[in-house]
Image: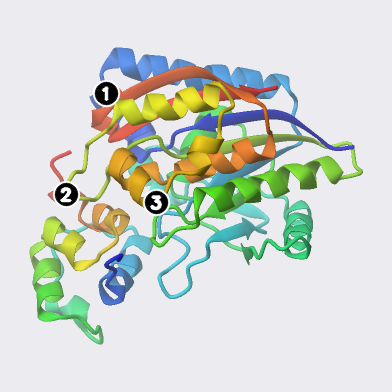
Amino acid sequence: MAEIVAAALASHAPMITGRPDIATPAQRDRLHDGFLELRRRLAATRPDLLVMFVNDHIQNFPYSNMPAFCIGLAKAYDAPSPGAARLMRIPPRKVAGAPEWAMALLEGGLAAGFDFAYSYEIESWDELAVPLHFLTPDATIPVVPVYTNCGAPPLPTPRRCHEVGAFVGAFIRSRPSAERVALLATGGISHWVGTPETGRINPDFDRRVLDHVARADIEPLARLSEAEIERDGGNGGQEIRNWIALLGAVPGWKGDVLAYEPVPEWITGCATVWVHP
Amino acid sequence: MIRTSYALNKILTALARQHVTTNGLTDDDFVGQDLTDAERAALKAGDITSLYHLGANPYLIRRVFRSRFSI
């Protein structure tokens, strides 16, 4: 039977790699150490596949056709593309997908009442490119991204994201093959980006989220409304939907916060969290 | 009620997908676009606050008018 061998949460932001020089060195180093520890722990679990809960930044899904949830069926993902690489200052590269596995997830979802959209071509912005730069620098683990609309309101509820994650977890555990699957959710925590409050971070909100994650107390997060997240976590805080989805896949698992740094220069409350039974 | 301008987001999405950054758009960028006078003015001026209040997606504002932000 397939099993979930690892789960992790990590922030993404273009400037984590694009402008490491502008962050306070101590903050930058602590966060980088957090990424490296995640990488070490992830590698130790020897995953065959990485299922990623992520969100688009209007790079792929336009306002003419905006999915709430979308499964990537691509053979490979630009992570980053040559265009995005200029900003993120990491080499452009292709990360392998797992289209047959992703198709099975899609079909299983549709059969179970989760009406996922799907896409055969996705150009990653920072949601895949930045965390994978740290976590799988050799890009040897194929990825299946599950995209959630976190950036073009109205958004799916955190409750629904939790249900989607629970489905993904059940799907993995139902697989007859001996697959070792790792889960990674990226995004968050608080940040205001592109709004008149750009640069604001709310460490109180971030610590509240991390505290719930550490105690596997996810219900209060699933109850949050879009307006409450916007007020306390900013428009970027809406990305905690990805975290909530992952935590739905591993009920009872608790978060070990490896790093948390509110980095104003990167416009993001940045964290790396190892999630374990 | 969420304020969203499809016209603004359509034109900004097209630019963001090409990884274009600019201080402000020109009349040539508006050909065939169904924009209001206020939207045209904000796009030309690179007025990031007005664009937000007119219903442009903040990620797109950030992507296209990055140079207009102090951080």
Which part of the image, by quadrant, shows the N terminus of chain B? bottom left
Q: What residue lies at 28% left-to-right and 72% top-to-bottom?
A: B11
State the residue position of label 2: A196
Q: Which residue is drawn at 50% across and 45% down?
A: A241
Q: Position of residue B4 (x, y in %)?
A: 29, 69
Q: Which of marks 1 and 2 is in front?
A: 2
Colour convention of the picture: rainbow
Cα–Cα gap, marks 2 and 3: 19 Å
Observer able to see residue A94: no
Q: Distance between the residues labelled 3 and 1?
A: 30 Å
State the mark number for residue A275.
Answer: none
Q: Which of marks 2 and 3 is in front?
A: 3
Residue found 38% across the figure and 63% down from its top: B17
- Total label count? 3
User: Are callouts 1 and 2 both on one chain?
Assistant: yes
Q: Are marks 3 and 1 in contact (CB under 8 Å)?
A: no
Q: How crowded is mark 2: few (under 14 residues within 10 Å), some or many (20 or more)?
A: some
The amino acid type of the residue labelled 2 equals Pro
Residue B5 sits above or below residue B58 on the image: below
Q: Which chain carries label 3?
A: A
Q: Where is residue A35 in the image (x, y as percent from the top left)?
A: 50, 23
| CB contact under 8 Å: marks 1 and 2 | no
Q: Is residue A81 above or below residue A256?
A: below
Read off the residue under disc 1. Answer: A23
Reading the chain from its start, which is encountered first: label 2 or label 3? 2
Residue designated by label 3: A226
Residue A136 spot, x, y in % from top left: 60, 31
